[in-house]
Image (tube, grey):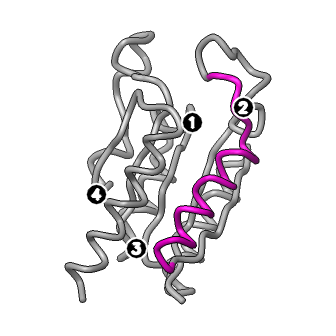
Amino acid sequence: MKKIMLLNGPNLNMLGKREPGIYGTGTLAELEKRITQLGRENGIEIISFQSNSEGKLIDKIQDAWESGIQGIIFNPGAYTHYSYAIRDAIAGIDVPVIEVHMTNVHKRESFRHVSVIAPVAMGQIVGLGFKGYELALLALLDKEKERG
């Protein structure tokens, strides 16, 4: 079975509790369940991982390549704006990555407008909440079909 990694960075473990006016009331467990179900419907196994640690996220990115993962749906959280180490890890693997943010980062504080991840990602989806993750999965499925 083909596998796609759902990777979430710092503070996403607090979904549903942290600033619900911005991020909504859905939890990370609910998001993972939703994406896992959509994956199952499309013959894809979803491997979910969340960490507040930059090094652990980098390890998972590198492991994805080594273990044959077909794609990564990644919300790097605040690391989006300054983690050159995560950027370099993504640039160093041959696995398509789609960067996802639940909120429209371009409508928020100016420091959130720049992503060091976007230049090495297949694409970026912002502002669509959980739906953005679903669209990322569908885009990765399309990419996999193109690759044969």
Please report the residue visible at 59 percent of the width from the left and 15 percent of the height from the top: 22
Amino acid of disc 1:
Gly
Disc 4 + disc 2, Cβ < 8 Å: no
User: Pointer 2: residues within 10 angstroms few (<14), some, or many (20+)?
Assistant: some
Q: Which residues are magenta?
A: 24-43
Q: Secondary structure at mark 2?
A: loop
User: Pointer 3: residues within 10 angstroms few (<14), some, or many (20+)?
Assistant: some
Q: Secondary structure at mark 1?
A: helix
Disc 1 + disc 4, Cβ < 8 Å: no
Q: Which residue is mark 1?
A: 77
Residue 107 placement: quadrant: top left
* Picture coordinates of residue 6, whole percent (x, y): 58, 59
Amino acid of disc 4:
Met
Residue 145 placement: quadrant: bottom left
For marks 3 and 1 on the same chain, the one whose residue lies earlier in the sequence: 1
* Picture coordinates of residue 53, whole percent (x, y): 72, 48
Q: Is residue 77 above or below residue 97?
A: above
Disc 3 to disc 2, how far (Cα)? 29 Å
Q: Which residue is mark 4?
A: 122
Q: Which mark is residue 15?
A: 2
Amino acid of disc 3:
Ile
Q: Nearer the viewer, residue 44 or 92?
A: 44
User: Which mark lies nearer to you, 4 or 2?
Assistant: 2
Disc 4 to disc 2, how far (Cα)? 25 Å
Q: Is residue 102 above or below residue 94?
A: above
User: Which mark lies nearer to you, 1 or 2?
Assistant: 2
